[in-house]
Amino acid sequence: IIPGRGGLPEDRGAAIDVSTVSELDPTATRVLLLGDPDGIPGDERSYEGAHYRLVPTTGATTLDSALSDPRAGDDALDAVLATLVEGKSRRIGEDLAAFGIEWVIAADDSPFLPLLDGQLDLVPLRGLPRPTFKVEAPALVARSTDGRAWFADGAGFAGLADAESRVRLAVNADARWGPGPWRQVDWANEVSAVDGFAEYRPIQPRRSLAWISLAWFVALPLLGWMGRRRS
């Protein structure tokens, strides 16, 4: 059922539910989920044999299940995880916050887990279903230049409209993000806050094909039902 849980079993869903302890709207942040591939919703990435992926704090759905090929932001996150594995950083939370990661949760045992306890800016939370750490540094997926949080809204982000302000989006840099003028900031995006909404403009033929596919997805069961009625 769309959107569904993205392959995440129901008991695992409770494991990443941090809404009761979150001070921010959960649509503004992400979870770095660690564990076995079977315990991670949808596709996963791995570093040195340890599996992980980013999921919305609101929970993964079927819309989040597939991962695209790694890009600049994915490589940057791998570099952060490398500093953890190699013991080069005792404050990895600040680096994770740049990706909008407010929470680190181990759905299963993970090689990363023993390394997290020594981090000075990751706060372990007790009494939750799985090992959970809160990132001390302010973490937002979308943040305006004056520090205001923007929140996930459909396929984009929404916040306070301000013609003089800009918004950093912690997603892989792509010039199709708007409204413009767009610019790349390291691996991320920066767009205008003039409309109070940031959106991704897909390539039009692909967008049309997606709508046609959705129409068929909805129509086929109906056509099958009508065929059975006539017979």
Image (tube, rainbow, N blue to C red):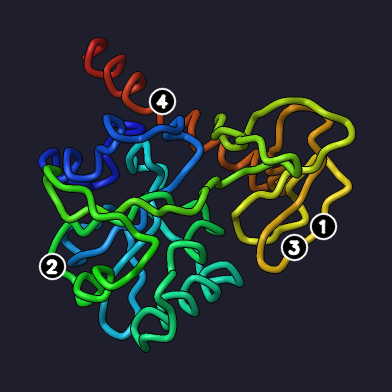
Q: Is residue 138 left or right of residue 32?
A: right
Mark found first going from the N terminus, 4 or 3: 3
Assign a secondary structure to mark 2.
loop
Vertical relation: 160 (above or below) 52: above
The residue that label 3 is drawn on is 185
- Residues at marks 2 and 3, CA–CA distance in whole angstroms: 35 Å
Mark found first going from the N terminus, 2 or 3: 2
- Residues at marks 2 and 1, CA–CA distance in whole angstroms: 39 Å
Mark found first going from the N terminus, 4 or 2: 2
How far from the left and from the top, in percent, is residue 175?
A: 77, 56
Vertical relation: 55 (above or below) 95: above
- Identify residue type, mark 2: Asp
> Which residue lies at the image location 39% right of the left edge and 61% below the top edge?
121
The residue that label 2 is drawn on is 109
- Residues at marks 4 and 2, CA–CA distance in whole angstroms: 40 Å
Q: In this view, does 60 lie to the left or right of 78?
A: left
Depth order, front residue of 6/149? 149
Assign a secondary structure to mark 3.
strand
Vertical relation: 147 (above or below) 172: above
- Identify residue type, mark 3: Val
The residue that label 4 is drawn on is 218
Q: Which residue lies furthest to the bottom in this view?
A: 86
How far from the left and from the top, in percent, is residue 157?
A: 62, 35
Is the Cβ of the residue at disc 4 closer than 8 Å to that at disc 2? no
Mark found first going from the N terminus, 2 or 1: 2
Label 1: few (<14), some (14–19) or many (≥20) C-alpha neighbours in 10 Å: some
How far from the left and from the top, in percent, is residue 111?
A: 20, 77
Q: Is label 4 or label 2 in front?
A: 2
Is the Cβ of the residue at disc 3 closer than 8 Å to that at disc 1? yes
Residue 183: which numbered mark, if any? 1
How far from the left and from the top, in percent, is residue 62?
A: 34, 42
> Which residue lies at the image location 40% right of the left edge and 75% below the top edge?
90
